[in-house]
Amino acid sequence: MAAVTPTAPRAHARARRRISPGRALAWAVMTAIVVITLVPFYWILRTALSSNAGLTVDPSSPLPTGLTGGGFARVFGQQSTKEALAQGGAGGSIDFWRYLLNSVVVSTLITVCQILFSAMAAYAFARLRWRGRDRMFGLFLAGLMVPTIFTFLPNFVLIKQLGLVDTLLGIALPSLFMTPFAVFFLRQFFMNLPREVEEAALLDGAGKVRIFFRVLLPMASTPVITLGVLTYITAWNDYFWPLMVSYSDSSRVLTVALSIFRAQTPQTGTDWSGLMAATLVAALPMLVLFGCFARRIVNSIGFSGIK
């Protein structure tokens, strides 16, 4: 018997491989967006790997000019004052690891506390029935319309009266408990959970607190992790508030330290190589963190009903 050639599947495969003009245009636009997004990061890396003398001679070169790792060496304190001055640096010492530790402590403290308290508030707004709940939630959401800069002065007065100026706790305290966005984000997820799970736990004798910590919170692990990543990135990138309340290396975070590094300008001009190296090192942990959880963040936001 002669073999039958599977012409139909092959024709179907060729039809699927055909790219319509609309699909081609969409891919072209997406590629352009990706390139435009990545070009600034490449330019930072290119500047960090260049020498300050090379940047002065050929500032528009797409490749590193005078390829060197001196900028990273100055950031990590691996250069002597004489070597730093010779390469166009300020020569001042930068306690990079202290600033990095301060940023990690502040961001972790804000993230852990804000996730815990926001989840508890979201559970109360979504699952508990109490008088005036919806009105209180609407009033709480009104906080989203208040610009953050309006709260800086009263927060600073409060932190000063508490004696927490120039401390890590003073930096973290205004964002420590909860935010309207975090409560809204988690409330949307809790509202979509089936009540049968909670009712079954109640029949087994579990109280509200136990149901929250042992049943609902583990079920909300995906949005909790997503919110944790977003909160950590926001706390890490915060600049203006830490600048207001920190005055010494003991409480100075990495974003503020970059401005200190920028202020140490030598007479020969700005140390662009060192500044871009410091910026890249400060941004790299957040890029890696977001890259690891990007898919989960997108899926969780879509599931929570945020458009």
Image: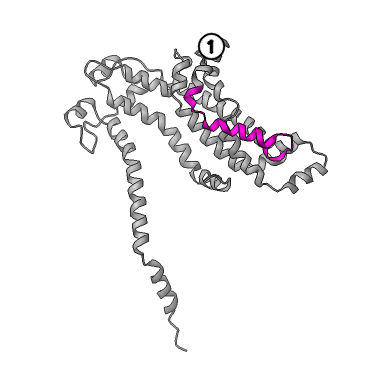
Residue placed farthest to the left in the image? 57
Compared across the picture, whether 245 is left or right of 17 comes to right
Find the magenta span and give its range: 125-150
| Quarter holding residue 97 | top left
Residue 33, percent from left and from top: 35, 47
Compared across the picture, whether 307 is left or right of 125 comes to left
Q: Amino acid at mark 1?
A: Lys
Q: Is residue 267 above or below residue 217?
A: above
| Quarter holding residue 40 | top left
Q: Is residue 15 above or below residue 240?
A: below
The chief SS type of the magenta part is helix
Residue 157, percent from left and from top: 53, 13
Q: Is residue 154 visible from the viewing direction of this image?
A: yes
- Work out whether residue 192 or residue 270 is closer to the camera in this orientation and state it: 192
Residue 53, percent from left and from top: 20, 25
Q: Is residue 90 above or below residue 56?
A: above
The figure's colour scheme reads one colour
Residue placed farthest to the bottom in the image? 1
User: Is residue 188 located in the magenta-colored stretch of the structure?
Assistant: no
Task: Classify mark 1: helix, strand or loop.
Answer: helix
Q: Residues within 10 Å of mark 1 (few under 14, many from 20)?
A: some
Number of marks in the image? 1
- Work out whether residue 279 or residue 189 is closer to the camera in this orientation and state it: 189
Q: Is residue 115 visible from the viewing direction of this image?
A: no
Compared across the picture, whether 66 is left or right of 285 comes to left
Compared across the picture, whether 294 is left or right of 112 comes to left
The residue at 32%/20% (across/down) is 262
| Quarter holding residue 190 | top right
Residue 150, percent from left and from top: 49, 23
Residue denoted by label 1: 160
The residue at 47%/24% (across/down) is 149
